[in-house]
Image (cartoon, rainbow, N blue to C red):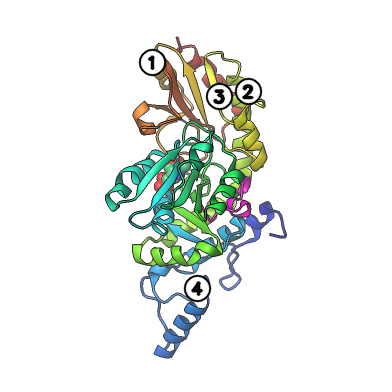
Amino acid sequence: MDKSIKTFLKHTAKDYHNQTVNPPVVRASTIIFKSMQDIRKTQKRGSKDPTGYHFDYGRMGTSTTFTLQQMLKKMENSYHVFLTPTGFGSVFLSIFSVVKPGDEILVADPVYSPTRLFTQDFLKNFNIRTIFYNPHDLNSLKKNITKKTKLIFVESPGSNSFEFQDLSKIITIAKKNKLFTIIDNTWATPYFFKPINLGFDMAIVSATKYYSGHSDVMGGSLAVNKRTFNLVQKAYKITGLRLGPDDAYLIIRGLRTLDIRLDKHQENAKKVASFLSKNKKIKILYPFNKGSFNYKMWKKYYSGASGLMGLKIKTKNKQSVIKFVNSLKLFGYGYSWGGFESLALHQDKQEQGNRKYSKLNKNEHLVRLHIGLEDPKDLIEDLKKSLKHIK
Ligand SMILES: Cc1ncc(COP(=O)(O)O)c(C=O)c1O
Protein backbone atom coordinates (compact mmCIF):
# COMPACT_ATOMS: atom_id res chain seq x y z
CA MET A 1 0.00 0.00 0.00
CA ASP A 2 1.74 3.21 -1.11
CA LYS A 3 -0.55 5.57 0.85
CA SER A 4 -1.41 5.42 4.54
CA ILE A 5 -4.25 3.05 5.36
CA LYS A 6 -6.15 6.09 6.69
CA THR A 7 -6.11 7.70 3.26
CA PHE A 8 -6.72 4.42 1.47
CA LEU A 9 -9.93 3.76 3.44
CA LYS A 10 -11.33 7.17 2.45
CA HIS A 11 -10.36 7.08 -1.23
CA THR A 12 -10.96 3.50 -2.23
CA ALA A 13 -14.17 1.99 -3.67
CA LYS A 14 -15.46 5.11 -5.41
CA ASP A 15 -17.71 4.40 -8.37
CA TYR A 16 -17.02 6.80 -11.26
CA HIS A 17 -19.32 4.81 -13.54
CA ASN A 18 -22.34 5.59 -11.36
CA GLN A 19 -20.72 8.81 -10.11
CA THR A 20 -21.15 7.78 -6.48
CA VAL A 21 -18.63 8.06 -3.70
CA ASN A 22 -19.63 4.61 -2.51
CA PRO A 23 -20.17 1.49 -4.60
CA PRO A 24 -23.75 0.45 -5.40
CA VAL A 25 -25.38 -2.54 -3.75
CA VAL A 26 -25.59 -5.07 -6.56
CA ARG A 27 -27.88 -7.99 -5.76
CA ALA A 28 -27.90 -11.04 -8.01
CA SER A 29 -28.49 -14.74 -8.13
CA THR A 30 -28.53 -14.85 -11.95
CA ILE A 31 -25.72 -12.95 -13.59
CA ILE A 32 -26.92 -12.14 -17.07
CA PHE A 33 -24.85 -12.34 -20.28
CA LYS A 34 -25.45 -11.19 -23.85
CA SER A 35 -24.73 -14.58 -25.42
CA MET A 36 -23.45 -18.07 -24.69
CA GLN A 37 -20.08 -16.99 -26.05
CA ASP A 38 -20.01 -14.29 -23.41
CA ILE A 39 -20.65 -16.82 -20.65
CA ARG A 40 -17.86 -19.07 -21.92
CA LYS A 41 -15.44 -16.14 -22.21
CA THR A 42 -16.13 -15.15 -18.59
CA GLN A 43 -15.67 -18.72 -17.39
CA LYS A 44 -12.40 -19.00 -19.31
CA ARG A 45 -11.16 -15.76 -17.78
CA GLY A 46 -12.26 -17.07 -14.35
CA SER A 47 -10.23 -20.24 -14.67
CA LYS A 48 -7.14 -18.28 -15.77
CA ASP A 49 -7.55 -15.59 -13.11
CA PRO A 50 -9.47 -17.17 -10.18
CA THR A 51 -9.06 -14.16 -7.86
CA GLY A 52 -10.48 -11.73 -10.44
CA TYR A 53 -13.99 -10.45 -11.11
CA HIS A 54 -15.26 -13.08 -13.56
CA PHE A 55 -18.44 -14.26 -11.89
CA ASP A 56 -21.03 -16.40 -13.66
CA TYR A 57 -23.36 -16.98 -10.70
CA GLY A 58 -24.43 -14.94 -7.67
CA ARG A 59 -22.96 -17.38 -5.18
CA MET A 60 -19.52 -16.24 -6.31
CA GLY A 61 -20.43 -12.65 -5.44
CA THR A 62 -21.28 -9.44 -7.20
CA SER A 63 -19.41 -6.20 -7.75
CA THR A 64 -20.27 -5.10 -4.17
CA THR A 65 -18.66 -8.12 -2.50
CA PHE A 66 -15.76 -7.92 -4.95
CA THR A 67 -15.15 -4.31 -3.90
CA LEU A 68 -15.03 -5.33 -0.25
CA GLN A 69 -12.67 -8.20 -1.08
CA GLN A 70 -10.31 -5.81 -2.86
CA MET A 71 -10.31 -3.39 0.09
CA LEU A 72 -9.54 -6.14 2.59
CA LYS A 73 -6.94 -7.73 0.34
CA LYS A 74 -5.02 -4.43 0.34
CA MET A 75 -5.37 -4.02 4.09
CA GLU A 76 -4.23 -7.59 4.77
CA ASN A 77 -1.54 -7.56 2.08
CA SER A 78 -2.80 -11.03 1.19
CA TYR A 79 -3.13 -13.02 -2.01
CA HIS A 80 -6.90 -13.16 -1.69
CA VAL A 81 -9.73 -12.63 0.80
CA PHE A 82 -12.77 -14.90 1.09
CA LEU A 83 -15.94 -13.43 2.55
CA THR A 84 -18.23 -15.42 4.82
CA PRO A 85 -21.64 -14.65 6.37
CA THR A 86 -20.20 -14.56 9.91
CA GLY A 87 -16.78 -14.50 11.52
CA PHE A 88 -17.30 -18.06 12.63
CA GLY A 89 -17.90 -19.01 9.00
CA SER A 90 -14.28 -17.96 8.36
CA VAL A 91 -13.04 -20.00 11.34
CA PHE A 92 -14.87 -23.02 9.93
CA LEU A 93 -13.70 -22.44 6.35
CA SER A 94 -10.05 -22.02 7.30
CA ILE A 95 -9.86 -25.35 9.14
CA PHE A 96 -12.24 -27.27 6.87
CA SER A 97 -10.13 -26.32 3.82
CA VAL A 98 -7.03 -28.16 4.98
CA VAL A 99 -7.98 -31.06 7.27
CA LYS A 100 -8.85 -34.64 6.43
CA PRO A 101 -9.70 -37.73 8.55
CA GLY A 102 -6.70 -39.01 10.49
CA ASP A 103 -5.15 -35.53 10.92
CA GLU A 104 -4.24 -33.86 14.18
CA ILE A 105 -4.44 -30.14 14.78
CA LEU A 106 -2.87 -27.88 17.38
CA VAL A 107 -5.08 -25.15 18.77
CA ALA A 108 -4.25 -22.41 21.28
CA ASP A 109 -5.92 -23.26 24.59
CA PRO A 110 -7.68 -19.90 25.07
CA VAL A 111 -9.56 -19.83 21.75
CA TYR A 112 -13.04 -18.43 21.31
CA SER A 113 -15.28 -21.12 22.83
CA PRO A 114 -17.22 -22.00 19.60
CA THR A 115 -13.82 -22.58 17.93
CA ARG A 116 -12.97 -24.89 20.81
CA LEU A 117 -16.27 -26.76 20.49
CA PHE A 118 -15.89 -27.11 16.72
CA THR A 119 -12.36 -28.47 16.93
CA GLN A 120 -12.52 -30.66 20.03
CA ASP A 121 -16.04 -32.08 19.60
CA PHE A 122 -17.23 -31.76 16.02
CA LEU A 123 -13.98 -32.62 14.25
CA LYS A 124 -13.61 -35.67 16.49
CA ASN A 125 -16.58 -37.16 14.64
CA PHE A 126 -14.45 -37.05 11.49
CA ASN A 127 -11.46 -38.69 13.16
CA ILE A 128 -9.57 -35.40 13.47
CA ARG A 129 -7.87 -34.99 16.82
CA THR A 130 -7.36 -31.60 18.48
CA ILE A 131 -4.59 -30.92 20.96
CA PHE A 132 -4.69 -27.62 22.84
CA TYR A 133 -1.35 -25.96 23.54
CA ASN A 134 -0.31 -23.53 26.25
CA PRO A 135 -0.01 -20.06 24.63
CA HIS A 136 2.82 -19.15 26.99
CA ASP A 137 4.79 -22.38 26.69
CA LEU A 138 5.58 -23.24 23.11
CA ASN A 139 7.20 -26.50 24.26
CA SER A 140 3.64 -27.73 24.70
CA LEU A 141 3.21 -26.93 21.00
CA LYS A 142 6.47 -28.51 19.82
CA LYS A 143 6.18 -31.69 21.85
CA ASN A 144 2.73 -32.45 20.44
CA ILE A 145 3.74 -32.30 16.78
CA THR A 146 3.50 -35.70 15.16
CA LYS A 147 3.52 -36.98 11.58
CA LYS A 148 -0.24 -36.51 11.60
CA THR A 149 -0.20 -32.82 12.59
CA LYS A 150 -1.69 -30.61 9.89
CA LEU A 151 -2.07 -27.13 11.29
CA ILE A 152 -1.63 -24.69 14.13
CA PHE A 153 -4.60 -22.50 14.97
CA VAL A 154 -3.78 -19.36 16.94
CA GLU A 155 -6.10 -16.78 18.39
CA SER A 156 -4.33 -13.65 19.50
CA PRO A 157 -4.92 -12.38 22.07
CA GLY A 158 -6.60 -15.32 23.82
CA SER A 159 -10.36 -15.08 24.03
CA ASN A 160 -11.34 -13.27 27.25
CA SER A 161 -8.00 -14.10 28.93
CA PHE A 162 -5.96 -11.96 26.49
CA GLU A 163 -2.68 -13.90 26.23
CA PHE A 164 -0.25 -12.63 23.59
CA GLN A 165 2.00 -15.25 22.06
CA ASP A 166 5.39 -15.29 20.42
CA LEU A 167 3.94 -15.40 16.93
CA SER A 168 7.11 -15.54 14.85
CA LYS A 169 8.33 -18.50 16.93
CA ILE A 170 5.07 -20.30 16.14
CA ILE A 171 5.60 -19.63 12.45
CA THR A 172 9.16 -20.91 12.59
CA ILE A 173 7.99 -24.12 14.28
CA ALA A 174 5.21 -24.52 11.70
CA LYS A 175 7.51 -23.96 8.72
CA LYS A 176 10.06 -26.43 10.05
CA ASN A 177 7.34 -29.06 10.34
CA LYS A 178 5.47 -28.07 7.15
CA LEU A 179 2.27 -27.17 9.02
CA PHE A 180 -0.39 -24.69 8.00
CA THR A 181 -0.84 -21.66 10.25
CA ILE A 182 -4.14 -19.88 10.88
CA ILE A 183 -4.73 -16.91 13.16
CA ASP A 184 -7.92 -15.31 14.40
CA ASN A 185 -6.97 -11.62 14.29
CA THR A 186 -10.38 -10.15 15.12
CA TRP A 187 -9.17 -8.19 18.17
CA ALA A 188 -6.48 -6.22 16.34
CA THR A 189 -7.64 -6.32 12.69
CA PRO A 190 -4.94 -5.68 10.05
CA TYR A 191 -5.03 -2.03 11.14
CA PHE A 192 -2.90 -2.98 14.16
CA PHE A 193 -1.31 -6.23 12.96
CA LYS A 194 -0.87 -7.92 9.58
CA PRO A 195 -0.49 -11.70 10.07
CA ILE A 196 0.14 -12.54 6.40
CA ASN A 197 3.21 -10.25 6.43
CA LEU A 198 4.56 -12.16 9.42
CA GLY A 199 4.14 -15.49 7.60
CA PHE A 200 0.73 -16.85 8.59
CA ASP A 201 -1.04 -18.78 5.83
CA MET A 202 -4.51 -17.56 6.76
CA ALA A 203 -5.91 -14.71 8.85
CA ILE A 204 -9.48 -14.49 10.11
CA VAL A 205 -11.35 -11.34 11.09
CA SER A 206 -14.95 -11.31 12.29
CA ALA A 207 -16.25 -8.34 10.28
CA THR A 208 -19.16 -8.29 12.73
CA LYS A 209 -16.85 -6.47 15.15
CA TYR A 210 -14.67 -3.46 14.24
CA TYR A 211 -15.04 -3.64 10.47
CA SER A 212 -18.76 -3.02 10.65
CA GLY A 213 -18.36 -1.01 13.84
CA HIS A 214 -22.05 -0.33 14.35
CA SER A 215 -23.41 -3.57 15.86
CA ASP A 216 -25.90 -4.09 13.06
CA VAL A 217 -24.32 -6.52 10.61
CA MET A 218 -22.52 -9.86 10.65
CA GLY A 219 -19.74 -11.03 8.37
CA GLY A 220 -16.33 -12.64 8.22
CA SER A 221 -13.17 -12.41 6.21
CA LEU A 222 -10.50 -15.00 5.59
CA ALA A 223 -7.28 -13.64 4.11
CA VAL A 224 -5.03 -16.24 2.52
CA ASN A 225 -1.57 -16.44 1.00
CA LYS A 226 -0.80 -18.02 -2.37
CA ARG A 227 0.10 -21.36 -0.79
CA THR A 228 -3.40 -21.89 0.62
CA PHE A 229 -5.51 -20.11 -2.01
CA ASN A 230 -6.43 -23.19 -4.09
CA LEU A 231 -7.33 -25.30 -1.09
CA VAL A 232 -9.60 -22.63 0.38
CA GLN A 233 -11.12 -21.75 -2.99
CA LYS A 234 -12.10 -25.39 -3.51
CA ALA A 235 -13.72 -25.65 -0.08
CA TYR A 236 -15.38 -22.22 -0.41
CA LYS A 237 -17.15 -23.26 -3.60
CA ILE A 238 -18.68 -26.39 -2.14
CA THR A 239 -19.67 -25.03 1.29
CA GLY A 240 -22.01 -22.42 -0.15
CA LEU A 241 -20.61 -19.78 2.22
CA ARG A 242 -21.36 -16.33 0.86
CA LEU A 243 -21.70 -12.79 2.20
CA GLY A 244 -24.75 -10.93 0.91
CA PRO A 245 -24.19 -7.63 -0.94
CA ASP A 246 -26.23 -5.56 1.54
CA ASP A 247 -24.04 -6.76 4.41
CA ALA A 248 -20.92 -6.22 2.27
CA TYR A 249 -22.05 -2.64 1.66
CA LEU A 250 -22.49 -1.97 5.38
CA ILE A 251 -19.05 -3.39 6.08
CA ILE A 252 -17.52 -1.16 3.36
CA ARG A 253 -19.25 1.80 5.00
CA GLY A 254 -17.89 0.78 8.40
CA LEU A 255 -14.37 0.42 7.02
CA ARG A 256 -14.29 4.07 5.97
CA THR A 257 -13.88 5.04 9.64
CA LEU A 258 -12.10 1.94 10.96
CA ASP A 259 -8.88 3.84 11.64
CA ILE A 260 -10.58 6.71 13.45
CA ARG A 261 -12.71 4.40 15.55
CA LEU A 262 -9.86 2.05 16.46
CA ASP A 263 -7.59 4.95 17.41
CA LYS A 264 -10.33 6.27 19.69
CA HIS A 265 -11.20 2.84 21.14
CA GLN A 266 -7.52 2.50 21.98
CA GLU A 267 -7.27 5.97 23.54
CA ASN A 268 -10.38 5.39 25.66
CA ALA A 269 -9.36 1.85 26.65
CA LYS A 270 -5.96 3.09 27.84
CA LYS A 271 -7.59 5.75 30.01
CA VAL A 272 -10.01 3.23 31.50
CA ALA A 273 -7.20 0.69 32.07
CA SER A 274 -5.11 3.34 33.78
CA PHE A 275 -8.02 4.16 36.12
CA LEU A 276 -8.78 0.48 36.84
CA SER A 277 -5.13 -0.36 37.48
CA LYS A 278 -5.38 1.58 40.77
CA ASN A 279 -7.86 -0.96 42.13
CA LYS A 280 -6.03 -3.69 44.07
CA LYS A 281 -8.71 -6.31 43.51
CA ILE A 282 -8.42 -6.03 39.71
CA LYS A 283 -5.85 -7.44 37.32
CA ILE A 284 -6.23 -5.88 33.90
CA LEU A 285 -6.09 -8.25 30.96
CA TYR A 286 -4.96 -5.83 28.30
CA PRO A 287 -1.49 -4.87 26.99
CA PHE A 288 -0.95 -2.35 29.76
CA ASN A 289 1.47 -3.68 32.34
CA LYS A 290 4.85 -2.89 30.78
CA GLY A 291 6.82 -5.51 32.71
CA SER A 292 4.63 -8.41 31.66
CA PHE A 293 5.31 -11.09 29.02
CA ASN A 294 1.96 -10.28 27.40
CA TYR A 295 2.98 -6.64 27.00
CA LYS A 296 6.33 -7.61 25.47
CA MET A 297 4.69 -9.91 22.95
CA TRP A 298 2.06 -7.30 22.09
CA LYS A 299 4.73 -4.64 21.61
CA LYS A 300 6.78 -6.98 19.41
CA TYR A 301 3.98 -7.59 16.88
CA TYR A 302 1.23 -4.99 17.22
CA SER A 303 1.10 -1.30 16.44
CA GLY A 304 -1.92 -0.69 18.67
CA ALA A 305 -4.61 -2.16 20.90
CA SER A 306 -8.37 -2.18 20.41
CA GLY A 307 -11.14 -1.59 22.94
CA LEU A 308 -11.73 -5.07 24.36
CA MET A 309 -10.23 -5.95 27.74
CA GLY A 310 -10.72 -8.33 30.61
CA LEU A 311 -10.76 -7.67 34.34
CA LYS A 312 -9.71 -10.50 36.60
CA ILE A 313 -11.32 -9.67 39.91
CA LYS A 314 -10.24 -11.30 43.16
CA THR A 315 -12.97 -11.75 45.72
CA LYS A 316 -14.79 -14.54 47.54
CA ASN A 317 -18.04 -12.77 46.83
CA LYS A 318 -19.15 -13.62 43.28
CA GLN A 319 -22.49 -11.87 43.74
CA SER A 320 -20.70 -8.59 44.44
CA VAL A 321 -18.99 -8.86 41.02
CA ILE A 322 -22.35 -9.41 39.35
CA LYS A 323 -23.71 -6.43 41.28
CA PHE A 324 -20.79 -4.33 39.99
CA VAL A 325 -21.64 -5.27 36.41
CA ASN A 326 -25.36 -4.80 36.89
CA SER A 327 -25.00 -1.32 38.29
CA LEU A 328 -23.08 0.04 35.30
CA LYS A 329 -25.25 2.57 33.50
CA LEU A 330 -23.25 3.25 30.31
CA PHE A 331 -22.25 -0.32 29.52
CA GLY A 332 -24.78 -2.50 27.73
CA TYR A 333 -25.05 -6.19 28.61
CA GLY A 334 -24.76 -8.33 25.55
CA TYR A 335 -22.51 -10.51 23.41
CA SER A 336 -20.29 -9.40 20.57
CA TRP A 337 -18.13 -6.26 20.64
CA GLY A 338 -16.38 -3.90 18.24
CA GLY A 339 -19.32 -1.54 17.87
CA PHE A 340 -19.29 2.13 18.85
CA GLU A 341 -20.76 1.40 22.28
CA SER A 342 -19.43 0.14 25.58
CA LEU A 343 -20.44 -3.32 26.77
CA ALA A 344 -19.91 -5.40 29.89
CA LEU A 345 -20.25 -9.12 30.56
CA HIS A 346 -19.64 -11.28 33.56
CA GLN A 347 -18.04 -14.42 32.13
CA ASP A 348 -19.12 -17.69 33.67
CA LYS A 349 -16.44 -20.37 33.81
CA GLN A 350 -18.31 -22.68 31.44
CA GLU A 351 -18.41 -19.91 28.82
CA GLN A 352 -14.64 -20.29 28.43
CA GLY A 353 -14.93 -23.99 27.57
CA ASN A 354 -12.97 -26.69 29.42
CA ARG A 355 -9.59 -25.02 29.16
CA LYS A 356 -6.47 -26.80 30.22
CA TYR A 357 -4.14 -23.88 30.87
CA SER A 358 -5.89 -20.50 30.80
CA LYS A 359 -8.17 -21.13 33.74
CA LEU A 360 -9.52 -18.95 36.50
CA ASN A 361 -8.37 -19.83 40.00
CA LYS A 362 -10.66 -20.07 43.00
CA ASN A 363 -12.07 -16.67 43.97
CA GLU A 364 -11.15 -15.15 40.61
CA HIS A 365 -13.89 -13.73 38.44
CA LEU A 366 -13.78 -12.45 34.92
CA VAL A 367 -15.54 -9.39 33.59
CA ARG A 368 -15.14 -8.44 29.95
CA LEU A 369 -15.43 -4.79 29.00
CA HIS A 370 -15.70 -3.37 25.54
CA ILE A 371 -14.64 0.26 25.74
CA GLY A 372 -16.67 2.23 23.24
CA LEU A 373 -16.45 5.70 21.78
CA GLU A 374 -18.22 7.57 24.59
CA ASP A 375 -16.42 10.28 26.55
CA PRO A 376 -13.97 8.24 28.68
CA LYS A 377 -14.58 10.56 31.65
CA ASP A 378 -18.19 9.38 31.74
CA LEU A 379 -17.15 5.74 31.47
CA ILE A 380 -14.65 6.13 34.30
CA GLU A 381 -17.25 7.88 36.47
CA ASP A 382 -19.70 5.05 35.80
CA LEU A 383 -17.08 2.42 36.68
CA LYS A 384 -16.02 4.33 39.79
CA LYS A 385 -19.56 4.30 41.19
CA SER A 386 -20.17 0.64 40.34
CA LEU A 387 -16.83 -0.69 41.60
CA LYS A 388 -17.93 0.18 45.14
CA HIS A 389 -20.17 -2.91 45.03
CA ILE A 390 -17.23 -5.31 44.85
CA LYS A 391 -16.74 -6.74 48.33
C1 LIG B 1 -12.26 -13.67 18.38
C2 LIG B 1 -13.54 -14.02 17.69
N1 LIG B 1 -13.49 -14.70 16.55
C3 LIG B 1 -14.60 -15.03 15.86
C4 LIG B 1 -15.84 -14.68 16.36
C5 LIG B 1 -17.05 -15.09 15.58
O1 LIG B 1 -17.55 -14.01 14.88
P1 LIG B 1 -19.08 -13.91 14.46
O2 LIG B 1 -19.84 -13.59 15.71
O3 LIG B 1 -19.10 -12.85 13.44
O4 LIG B 1 -19.45 -15.26 13.91
C6 LIG B 1 -15.95 -13.96 17.53
C7 LIG B 1 -17.25 -13.56 18.07
O5 LIG B 1 -17.42 -13.09 19.17
C8 LIG B 1 -14.76 -13.63 18.24
O6 LIG B 1 -14.79 -12.97 19.40
Residue 315 x/y as whole percent: 44, 12
Q: Which residue is mark 2?
A: 274
Can you tell which quarter of the image residue 165 is in? top right
Q: In front: mark 4 or mark 1?
A: 4
Q: Which residue is mark 4?
A: 50
Q: Which residue is mark 3?
A: 284
Can you tell which quarter of the image residue 268 is in? top right
Q: Amino acid at mark 4?
A: Pro
Say whether residue 238 is left or right of residue 379: left
Q: In front: mark 3 or mark 2?
A: 3
In the picture, which quadrant includes the N terminus? bottom right
Q: Amino acid at mark 1?
A: Lys
- Point out the quarter of the image occupied by ligand 1: top left
> Which SS class for mark 4?
loop
Q: Which residue is mark 1?
A: 318
Can you say whether 230 is above or below 370 in the image?
Answer: below
Q: CA distance from mark 1 to mark 2?
A: 24 Å
Q: Amino acid at mark 2?
A: Ser
The residue positioned 50% from the left and 81% from the top of the image is 45
- First-in-chain label (1 vs 2): 2
Q: CA distance from mark 4 to mark 1?
A: 54 Å
In the picture, which quadrant includes the C terminus? top left
Q: Is residue 202 magenta?
A: yes
Q: Is mark 4 within 8 Å of ligand 1?
A: no
Say whether residue 5 is left or right of residue 354: right
**Magenta residues (range):** 191-203
Q: Is mark 2 within 8 Å of ligand 1?
A: no
Q: CA distance from mark 2 to mark 4?
A: 49 Å
- First-in-chain label (4 vs 3): 4
Q: CA distance from mark 4 to mark 3?
A: 46 Å
- First-in-chain label (3 vs 2): 2
Residue 385 x/y as whole percent: 51, 15
